[in-house]
Amino acid sequence: MQTVILAAGQGTRMRPLTETMPKPMLPVGDRPLVEHTVRAAVDAGTDEIILVVGYEGDVVREHFGGSYAGVPIQYAEQPERTGTASALRVASEYVDDQFAVVNGDVVYERESLVDLFRSGPSIGSTRVQEPSNYGILEVGDGAVTKIVEKPADPPGNLANAGVYVLPRRALEHLDVPKSERGEYELTDVLSRVIEDGHVRHVELEGWLDVGRPWELLEANGQHLREIESNVFGEVSPDAKLEGRIVVEEGATVRSGVVLDGPALIRSGATVGPNAYVRGPTVVGKDASVGHGVEIKNSVLLAGASVNHLSYVGDSVLGRNVNLGAGTTVANLRHDDEPVQMTVNGDRVSTGRRKFGVVLGDGVRTGIDTSLNAGVTLSPGATTEPGDVVTRDR
């Protein structure tokens, strides 16, 4: 089995995080998002990985090199991101026989992928609550008969999960026309494969589409709830660790700290003194959480600093963010409605009663800054002392 992993996109819905980092390399726990996909494919028995890269592709190449856990990796360059079918087209020269295609921004349980690999030709599926937001599968006698894209009147709630096992002859159908949104869609290729013959569907467990910042938070939470506690770094005798906690080698947890897991403190990070971190939270490599700071259900990327008397909840802080003393994040609306964010110019509900902020790399806030729920700050943005930020910057 060869596995083609689609990891060329920038991930505009994940901005501002992806203005300086490709979405596949955003962290989920202790590794990039796409590494979870690669690892699942390897564990499921794939013999070769074909990574389709594009935006900041060198970052992906540098991370993986030529193999992963002994499984060789080849790279296919997609210079123009014109859709998933064109991504498969650039990978097609490496495909020898039946092969898998996996979106690089989806997480799921390994056992589900094993079942999918054994059942090809097949399409991974998952049950969703809002089927009009997805491609929905029509099935009969155990086979997929049709894919209906984002139907106004859905025929069911069984959604296309973005994971497939296809016969090599599927590559004969890559000459699909552009869709209404101006892209060459893999779902149009799948429709032709379905017309060719029997295609099974396999329901995937633990499936999560990680396309927007709050889904990145959910993916981290899902991962951290499964970690095994390990303490390799330096932990003060009077620090209190509860629940699932990992303190990596080279990390420091100082006196008076309470870690209420699940939580991951990465190498080079410092927490405390007298800080409260409650999970699920990742404190990234070389990040700093200082005196009197509370961090709740958040992801701090490498080098982020929250050092003095601040609160950060349900938020994602980019690399080398620095929050001035007393910076406070709001993460709850007074009317208890779901927090909204602006995604690609549209106001979108996060579906979460609690959600804080998303700060791009290098953001710096002045002392006593207040950040409203759902606000995003672009890379390098700053605030003045005492600012109350209620709109994106």
Image: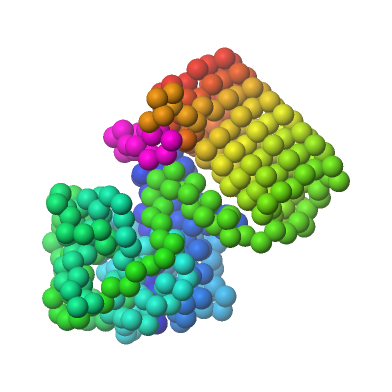
Q: Quadrant of the C terminus?
A: top left
Q: Which of the 4 quarters of the picture holds residue 86? A: bottom left
The image shows residue 66 at horizontal and vertical percentages of 52, 72
- Is 154 rendered above or below residue 291? below
Judging depth in this view, the residue of 76 and 98 nearest the camera is 98
Q: Is 340 included in the stretch rendered in magenta?
A: yes
Question: Which residue is pictured at 56% across the width and 42% down the height?
Answer: 297
- Residue 149 visible within the image: yes
Q: Residue at x 76, y 33 (%)?
A: 274
The extreme top residue here reads 386
Q: Quadrant of residue 342?
A: top left
Q: Is residue 349 magenta?
A: yes
Reply above or below: 347 against 132.
Answer: above
Magenta span: 338-353
Residue at position x 39%, y 78% in the image: 115
Residue sitting nearer the eye, 196 or 227: 227
Residue farthest to the bottom?
Answer: 97
Whole-percent x and y of residue 193? 19, 75
Front residue of 347 and 63: 347
Q: Observer-nearest residue: 91 or 359? A: 359
**Is the N terminus in the top left, top right, bottom left or bottom right quadrant?**
bottom left
Above or below: residue 21 compared with residue 368: below
Instruction: Say whether residue 37 is left or right of residue 137.
Output: right
Instruction: Classify residue 168 as left or right of residue 70.
Output: left
Q: Position of residue 154 (x, y in %)?
A: 17, 55
Can residue 193 be seen here? The reply is no
